[in-house]
Structures are given as structure tokens and as C-alpha cells.
Image (cartoon, rainbow, N blue to C red):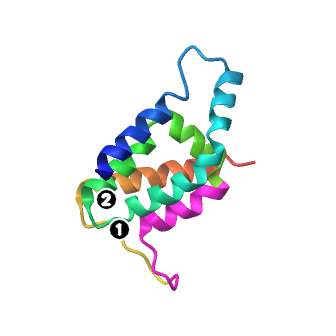
Amino acid sequence: KLILLLHEVDTLISLLRKRDDSEDQIESNLSSFDAHFSPLVSRLCLCISSDNSRISEQSLQMFRNDTFSVMVRRRVKEAGPKFIRALCRCSTNGEGFEVSWNPTVRKMTFLVLSQLEGYYNHLD
């Protein structure tokens, strides 16, 4: 059920941004979702760090969604550290980390980490 829910959320986020929308319309649509962004990030972090590889994989698929990527880029200072902790499965004491055992999730994790690194590199 969680995988279906993640897919539906991904579809909903895709609908926030249409090809023929102006930049102002896109910004307005994304801003309307701001109140839900923080809880979404928290839930996605739980799913990303799940031991179930299918849940992790579906969660990481969100980063392939252009609209979601724009949302993360806009609030990378807030969301970035949370995602990094979930992606690296950092220990609670901050000493070391581990990546998923699943090869697909591992590859997607490194792609998302690279994407987040790019967002940080473009901060003012």
C-alpha cells in the first residue's frame, strides 16, 4: 500500500507543474504546496531509509520527478540535511554511515546524493 501511495504522491506533484504554465503560475502552484513539503520530506526520509528495498526505490523515484526536484532545490537548506541522513543511514551518534544493501537502491542513492550536491553548489 505504501508503494501505491508514494506513486500517487509522485503523480500529484507532477500535476503542480504543466508545460504551458508561465513561471509565475509554476511558482504559485509550488508555493501552494509549501505547507505540505516538510511533512512529505519527513515521510520520504522514513521510506528512503526503509529496509524494504521496494519502498526505498519508489521513494528515490521521486527525485526523477522534475517538479519535485524543483521543490527540493528551492528548499535544499531545509530538506537537504534530512535527505542526506536518510540516504546515508547515518548512525545516531554521527559516527559513520552505511548505504543500502540493494544494488538498485545503492545506485539511485548515489544519483540522488549527486543531485543534492549540485543543488548545494548552486546556492548563493
Residue reaching furthest to the right: 124
What whole-number distance in Å separates the C-alpha atoms at marks 2 and 1?
6 Å
Residue reaching furthest to the top: 20
Residue 93 falls within the magenta-colored stretch: yes
Name the residue tied to disc 1.
99
Please report the residue visible at 42 percent of the width from the left and 75 percent of the height from the top: 97
Determine whether, in the image, residue 79 is placed left or right of residue 97: right
Name the element at disc 2. helix
Callout 2 environment at 10 Å: few (<14), some (14 to 19), or many (20+)? some
Determine whether, in the image, residue 73 is placed left or right of residue 56: right
Kindly tell me whether residue 88 is visible in this rendering.
Answer: yes
Residue 25 falls within the magenta-colored stretch: no
Name the residue tied to disc 2.
106
Q: Position of residue 115 (x, y in %)?
A: 50, 48
Q: Position of residue 77 (x, y in %)?
A: 66, 56
Main SS, magenta region, reads helix
Looking at numbered disc 1 in the image, what kind of residue is underneath it?
Val
In-front residue for pair 1/21: 1
Please report the residue visible at 70 percent of the width from the left and 49 percent of the height from the top: 123
Looking at numbered disc 2 in the image, what kind of residue is underneath it?
Arg
Q: Position of residue 106 (x, y in %)?
A: 31, 59
> Up-down: is 97 above or below 44?
below
Residues at badges 2 and 1 in contact (C-beta under 8 Å)? Answer: yes
Which is nearer the N-term, disc 2 or disc 1?
A: 1
Q: Position of residue 25 (x, y in %)?
A: 67, 22
